[in-house]
Image (tube, helix red, strand yellow):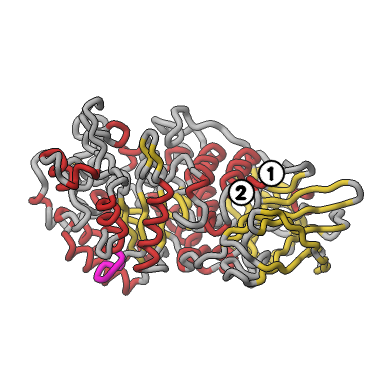
Amino acid sequence: MSSSQELYRLPHHDGSELYLSKSAPDLGERVTFKFRASRDFPIETAILRLYHDGEPRFFPMSKKLIKDQQWWQVSVLILNQKTPYRFLLINGDRYSWLNASGFHSHDVTSGDDFQLLATRKFPSWIRSSVFYQIFPDRFASSGKYRALAPKHFVPRDWDLLPKGRDKSTGVEYFGGDLDGVSEHLDHIRDLGVNGIYFTPFFPAGSTHRYDAHSFEKVDPLLGGDAALARLKRKADKYGIRLMGDLTTNHCGAGHPWFLKAKKMPSSKERKFFYFDRKLKNGYEGWWGVANLPKLNYNSAKLRELMYSGKNSIVKKWLRRPYSMAGWRIDVGNMTGRYKGEDMNLEVIRGVRKAVDEVNPDAWLLAENADHFPQDLDGFGWHGTMNYNGFMRPIWGWLKHQPQVNFGFFGVPVSVPTFTGSEMVSAMRGFASGIPWRNFVSSMLLLDSHDTARFRNVVGDDRTRHIAGMGLLLTYPGVPSIFMGDEIGLKGAWGEDARRTINWNRVGWDEEFLESVKQLVAIRRSSHALSEGGLRWIAVEDDLVSYIRESKRERVLIVITRAGGRFELPELSVSEKLYGPTFKGRIFETGSAAVGIYRLS
């Protein structure tokens, strides 16, 4: 990648407010497209290339010089719901392209074009939100419902660690519940976050609850529907939104749909599943797991019950009294896909339509660990859990003597080592394949209930953990902190990471907690960090730096994974928000560090 000085000079465009006059125009409305470059960067002519009705069109751009930057722009009528576009830059007998993957001095295809969507705006509140992920059985317990635990659950004392690798895996019961969350909601509020994402809260045969026995009620072990309603009222007073988790791909083998389908081959429920005598269990399960029968969306009745009907599951929980702020869809990329059948797109758009009908401001997020860009086309999921373009690259860059039992989520190798350039290439690769609106509506995470803890990835190195938190809370997208990460909780693999929180504060990294609070506060209060674009200005083996810029504010972020003396472009800092003092060109630190600065 280019040196810091060259990278800062290069032409740049993204989908943020500085570069597009409207990000969600109506059809037939004009939009002004802009890009910028350093004043001394050689450009004789610039042309916007976009598609109208599938045909390429070219629009000459005009130039303005503003301080040390040249700005090129043109206004164009928008005719299609999706408009792919890129910029042609001409200098003598040479030309180059600027597209979503960067600046190229060779011909490119439309695969990495920028994408403008003339569709309903995505939920705007998520842009200034920080979420907190709660695994209900492990966050906090009121102690009220333990007597209701089924006999096959294995009771565990609260302060013990999960075993995670024996017959009790999946049924270890620590007794967390929603009233426990209510009792400790002050902790979440004081952290500064304003959203909670719950892994499933439906009744199930396990304590992870991804094998739902019903989608119609809250598990009595968590306090039932009344406990969720109580929590919702208190969360509303604190300004905290609640978001649920739904398995559209499968249910549990104890679900009434499946029980009836097994008992009555002539029932309508039989068509909700893939029964086949040739299969090991006589039906298809997620990854072949008997306890997780896969749902068959060839059934119109299933589609009606799940999302399209007036009182569907998707719609019910978005309405009062629960008014959930949205859904995280488990294994969204697998839903509706089975052997020669692929109804995934139909289901995605059906779920999106259902959400929009009940609450157009609800957030629709899919788990998609390996990332299917075609699933984020602007018309289905608003975003994905960004494992591929955020968590995994950061693990490889910031890892330090990792204490993990498995490597990347979904990849059967240990955690590799990445340079700063390799990390940024992976991050840009994710962002370039999807519309900007999907990119900034995706969830950012350093870890989750399915992975090792980030504290283990960095070998208990607090400074590297802070560096990771700095990336999490300054990068475009919706940051999410897995419960306990803020106090330095550990876990070597997914089940081990599902540890309880000691509310006597034993083992808490209090110094780290204060740093996280500061970073969350900066994120929540900065217009540039919520609405701004992303311009990389320095990428080295041990340092990355970028500018987030909106119409109101410019913020510089510098992240290092090791101590050193680094040279950056000449920038005018008006205020240090976090980290070492930085003026002029030299950034110096004795360890991994985060620097956040407001620019003049």
Which part of the image, by quadrant, shows the C terminus? Answer: bottom right
Magenta extent: 318-323
Look at the picture and state if 74 lies above or below 170.
Answer: below
Look at the picture and state if 277 lies above or below 298.
Answer: above
Where residue 563 appears, x then y in whole percent? 63, 43
Q: In the displayed structure, does residue 231 sit left or right of residue 48?
A: left
Residue 432, numbered circle? 2
Where residue 494 appears, x then y in whole percent? 35, 38
Q: In the displayed structure, does residue 301 sit left or right of residue 395?
A: left
Residue 320 shown in magenta: yes
Q: Which amino acid type is shown beneath numbered disc 2? A: Ser
Q: Which amino acid type is shown beneath numbered disc 1? A: Thr
Q: In the displayed structure, does residue 511 sit left or right of residue 599?
A: left
Residue 82 shown in magenta: no
Residue 109, numbered circle? 1
To which quarter of the image does residue 69 belong?
bottom right
**Crowd band around label 1 with a 10 angstrom C-alpha radius: few (<14), some (14–19), many (20+):** few
| Residues at marks 1 and 2 touching, judged by CB atoms closer than 8 Å | no
Look at the picture and state if 298 lies above or below 142.
Answer: above
Residue name at image x 43 percent, y 44 percent: 368
| Camera-nearest residue between 84 and 137 | 84
Secondary structure at numbered mark 1: loop
